[in-house]
Every structure is written in C-alpha cells, then in structure tokens.
Amino acid sequence: MQYVSTRGRADALDFEGATLAGLASDGGLYLPERWPTFTAEDLSAMRGLSYVETAVRVILPFVGDSLSEDELRDLCTQAYGRFAHAAVTPLVQLDHGHWLLELFHGPTLAFKDVALQLLGLLFEKFLSRRETHLTIIGATSGDTGSAAIDAVAGRAGIDIFMLHPAGRVSDVQRRQMTTVLAPNVHNIAIEGSFDDAQALVKRAFNDPDFSSRYDLSAVNSINWARLVAQVVYYIYAGVRLGAPDRSVAFAVPTGNFGDVFAGYVASRMGLPIERLVVATNVNDILHRALSEGDYSQGTVVPTATPSMDIQVSSNFERLLFDLNGRDGAALAEQMKGFEQTRAMRLTNAQRDGAAALFSSARIDADGMSRAMRWAYDAAGQIIDPHSAIGLAAAHTAAVDPSVPMVTLATAHPAKFRDAVERATGVRPGLPSRTGDLFGREERYVTLPATFEAVTYYIAGHAVKRGS
Ligand SMILES: *Cc1c(COP(=O)(O)O)cnc(C)c1O
C-alpha cells in the first residue's frame, strides 16, 4: 500500500515512510492510494473478535509490507493492554436509541491514547530498523501533550519536547505531563498562550538552520498512522450494534477533524454508517463549512471544551481531496487561496459529497450543560464537556430513530472536573489508574515565549542528526 499527498506533488511513500514523515514535503497530508474494503461477510466475521483482533483486521490492509501480521498483533497487544477496560472502548447504553462509546480508558484519560499508544510503538519499531533518531517537538493545550508523552516515555530513539502554556492547562493535565520523569521527556512551560507555544513550534519546523540539525517530527493528528488506529473503534462498535445488517450513526465532538475523518474512512471501507454528526462548540468553522459551504477562519473563543477550540481543522483537507476526485493540483490551489485569505468556498462536488454522509451542529455552553445534566438525570452517566457537545449534537440530528446513535465520549469526566461539577453538582474522582498523580515529583522548565530561549534549550538536550 502506497500513500499519496493531498497536494499531489510529494513522492508516494509506504506505511513506514508516511508514519515517520507525518506531513508530506509539499505541505499536504498523506492518504492511502485507494480504500481497502470489507464485504458484509468480513464484517460479520468480526462479531466475536476482541478489540485487539479487530484492530489487526482493520489496520493490516493499510500497512502493506511495513509490518507482518504478527508484528502488528504484537504492537496492538502492547498498546491496548494498557487500557483499564477489557473491551478497550466499551459501549454504554443511555436510552433506547443512544449509546456512548467510551474512548477514555487509556493511561491519560482522553481518546488520544487510542492512537498515540500505537503510534509510539510504531515509531520505536521503524526507528530501530533504520537506526535513526527522532526529535518530537509539539505544543499542547493539554490532551495531546500528555497522551504523546505517555506513549513515547522511555522509548529508544526518541526525544520529546512538549511546550504548554504556563498556568493555562488544568492541574491534572499538567501533572500528567510533568510527573513523567523519563530522561527522553522534556516539558517546557511557556510564559505565554497556547497560540504562542504553537507559533514557536511552527517556527522551529520552518527554520532551515534549526530543522536541518535534528530529525524533527510532529505528533499532531496530521499523522496518518494516528487516524488508522481510530478507524478501529468505529468498526468495533458498529459490528457490536448490528452491522453489517443494521446501519449505525455516530456523533463526534470535533476539533481538528481527525476523529470524525476516521469515521469517514470506516464508511469508505464498507461499514454501513447512516450519518456522521460533526459536533462543534461555538468555534464553528466546520459547522459553517458543512452547512453553508463557508470555510472561513474566525478568532478562537476559549470554552469549557479546550480540545475543540480550533479555527482551522487540518484534517478537513483530507476530506476535501477525497471528495474532489483526488485532484491534488486543484486542492493545492484551493488551500493556497485559504492560506492567503483565511477563507474558502467548498466546490459543489465537495458540498454534495459531504452532505451525503455528514451533518453538523454547533452547541453553545447552555446546550453543553443541558446534555451533561440529561446524561446524569436520564441515564446516571457523568460525562465530560467534550462528550456533552457530541451528545447534544446527537439529540439534534434528524436520523431515523431505528438507527442506533453512538456519541463518542472523548475524555474522562475527571479530566475536566470543574466544568462537570458546575453543570451537575457532582465532582468526579480520578480513576485509580492515575495513582498518586498529586503526590509525585514534577519536572519542567519555564521559558519566555521567545524562539531563542526555546531553541537554545532544545539544542542543549536533543540528539543531533547523524550522531
Ligand atoms: C482532541 C480532542 C477532541 C477533538 O478531536 P479531533 O480529532 O481534533 O477532532 C475532542 N475531545 C477531546 C477530549 C480531545 O482531546
């Protein structure tokens, strides 16, 4: 299986190459050259399978010669063995028609563990084959940083530098990063906002002098291997709710369009998905794009769902490419226009193609709180604010009531205890797998938000290319 860039100019790569590259050299994102498909018999045969065996069946067609089936099984067993629930991503029924798909049973309490636990192992495997080293640099508003650090801590061949805005992530989120004392983990608190941290990371990647000295990599959801790991739980849940004989609908709290794009892939692979409901908070660029064809960037408004406070959704490019006849030159032109004006119109093919599968809803703070209270009062479930945005959107969706509606629960409520307590009056406790998070030693440096300070620190701690 080869991977092609959405902008049509980068060389095709195999799975190993696309995983290590992350972003394509022409600025585009990698997609498989074609979608592997499952027949109805293939799906029926997955009914009794464990999560790990489902993962092997779903991911194997994508890896080509990069991994044998046994190697893939071994990595999935390790990655998902660290989850606190035997079903890895269990379904919980809320009423006759609604389910939650709980994706937060991993080590850092958010769904990003599902993808990053596997990605950390893939990096380690591919790097040891090539005898090379990787320096991961990232900025985080909370969830990605903790999940990425947990996934690569202590792994050979990798150093990780994670920038977070000092004082602007929750105590739980900070401690999940700073109490990891492995020597390859470097936490940097930036005296500034998340945007400042993000801008510093982008500048480091774009600085030819700095980036030529290290083998740099990113861990945000532009990495194809992250998305493929997320396709698994759509199929796992769909099959449990009656696929291929019955269709299923999913409501997905969305930021960077990675999670819901994995649902699109599951649909292209043959899972009968009736509808994918894209749920946004008031940062609603995706809702405007899907309902009106208007993809134009606004200013980010901070909300109780920080992981969805995004005004440019990187993975949307993958959908636009697939719906535009995979014309890389046309998409490169469209994206160039967006980069210049911060706005673009979807083409008719893109709008019609998206409308056939996606609908969307924009949920404000009231709608989010109402959904949290409904889940608690009607079903006895405490849910986190991000999942509540998804559930509120599921309730607005015009889907045949005989189709099961599954809301993706993307974070554990204890990760956002204050917001949950405000809405429900209940303060969720941390699960036992987080152990003595508040008793452990923390280690991080605080640096001013300047390029010189950050690159000087990284230069003092990173491994140089070729050494
Ligand atoms: C990252 C995140 C999201 C958004 O996922 P995308 O793949 O960026 O759309 C939603 N909820 C939580 C809790 C997250 O951490």
Image (cartoon, rainbow, N blue to C red):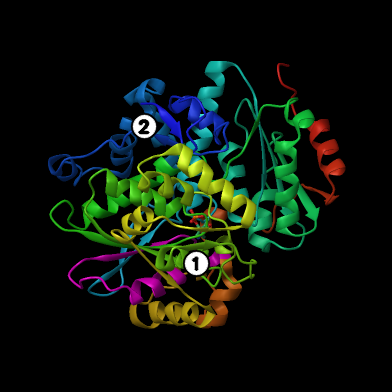
**Is 333 or 177 nearer to us in this picture?**
333
Residue sitting at 12 percent across and 54 percent down? 245
The image shows residue 120, relative to residue 174, as above or below, that is above
Q: Which residue is disc 2 drawn over?
A: 33
> Which percent across, then down, holds residue 384?
49, 69
**Residue 441 in view here:** no
Q: Position of residue 275 (x, y in %)?
A: 29, 62
Question: Left or right: where does residue 216 sit relative to residue 93?
Answer: right
| Residue name at image x 45 percent, y 38 percent | 328
The residue that label 1 is drawn on is: 386
Local crowd size for mark 1, using a 10 Å CA cut-off: few (<14), some (14–19), many (≥20): many
- Give the quadrant of residue 67: top left
Mark 1: which amino acid? His
Q: Quadrant of the C terminus?
A: top right
Q: Identify which residue is drawn at 64% across, 58% down.
A: 173
Residues drawn in magenta: 388-415
Q: In the shown orientation, is residue 123 left or right of residue 388?
A: right
